[in-house]
């Protein structure tokens, strides 16, 4: 599954930012707090600081940012809600033998647009141990190529489960 992201930025107050279908935002400011007013069924207003996570309920279609006139801010939005820790991969196997992987959104996002035919994982066994090793490599190097190798091996491992 592809990770969809976008960044919305502004200065001061900003009205009616469309968040239809977006489930998550991470707040970025220069250290000041901003208020976010979620509009729609079950909406509310709350103060957020730099780095805070905003979970956007599916019933919410827009939000307003309330900030000082000169306050610059960004909302790093994602369709799905990522794990809090993006430096630690967590894998679990359900009773029905379905493998679930969390904590790899940043690496998947970095490598997902690379054509899988352009990266080679030949010689790497498609198992959880090697997937963990490739995750750590991609995390350390931050390269698109290592991220793409991880994405390709992840697809192979998930295919087995």
Image (tube, rainbow, N blue to C red):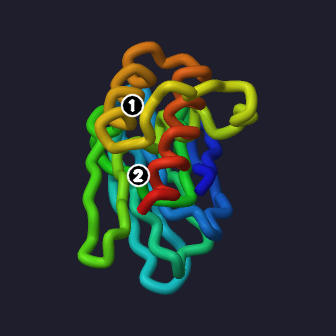
Rendered residue at 66%/25% (across/down): 119
- Of all residues, the one furthest to the top in this rendering is 141
Tell me residue 67's x, y (percent): 48, 44
- Of all residues, the one furthest to the bottom in this rendering is 41
Tell me residue 148's x, y (percent): 59, 31
Above or below, 8 relative to 120: below
From the image, state whether disc 1 or disc 2 is nearer to you: 1
Residue 32 visible in this rendered orientation of the protein? no
| Left or right: residue 88 compared with residue 42 | left
Q: Nearer the viewer, residue 23 or 105?
A: 105
Q: CA distance from mark 1 to mark 2?
A: 16 Å
Rendered residue at 62%/68% (across/down): 21
| Left or right: residue 58 compared with residue 82 | right
- Counting residues from the start of the chain, the first of labels 1 and 2 encountered is 2
> What residue is pinned by disc 2?
82
User: Which disc, if any, is residue 135?
Assistant: 1
Q: Nearer the viewer, residue 141 or 134?
A: 134
């Amino acid at each position: 599954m592809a990770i969809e992201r976008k960044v919305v930025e502004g200065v001061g107050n900003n009205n009616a930012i469309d968040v239809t279908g977006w489930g998550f935002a991470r707040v970025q400011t220069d250290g000041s707090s901003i208020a976010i007013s979620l509009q729609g069924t079950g909406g509310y207003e709350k103060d957020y600081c730099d780095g805070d996570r905003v979970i956007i309920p599916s019933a919410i279609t827009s939000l307003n940012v309330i900030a000082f006139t000169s306050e610059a801010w960004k909302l790093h939005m994602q369709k799905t809600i990522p794990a809090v820790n993006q430096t630690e991969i967590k894998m679990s196997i359900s009773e029905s033998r379905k493998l679930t992987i969390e904590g790899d959104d940043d690496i998947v996002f970095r490598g997902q647009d690379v054509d899988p035919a352009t990266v080679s994982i030949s010689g790497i066994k498609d198992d959880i141990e090697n997937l963990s090793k490739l995750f750590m490599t991609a995390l350390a190097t931050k390269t698109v190529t290592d991220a793409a190798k991880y994405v390709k091996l992840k697809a192979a491992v998930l295919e087995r489960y």
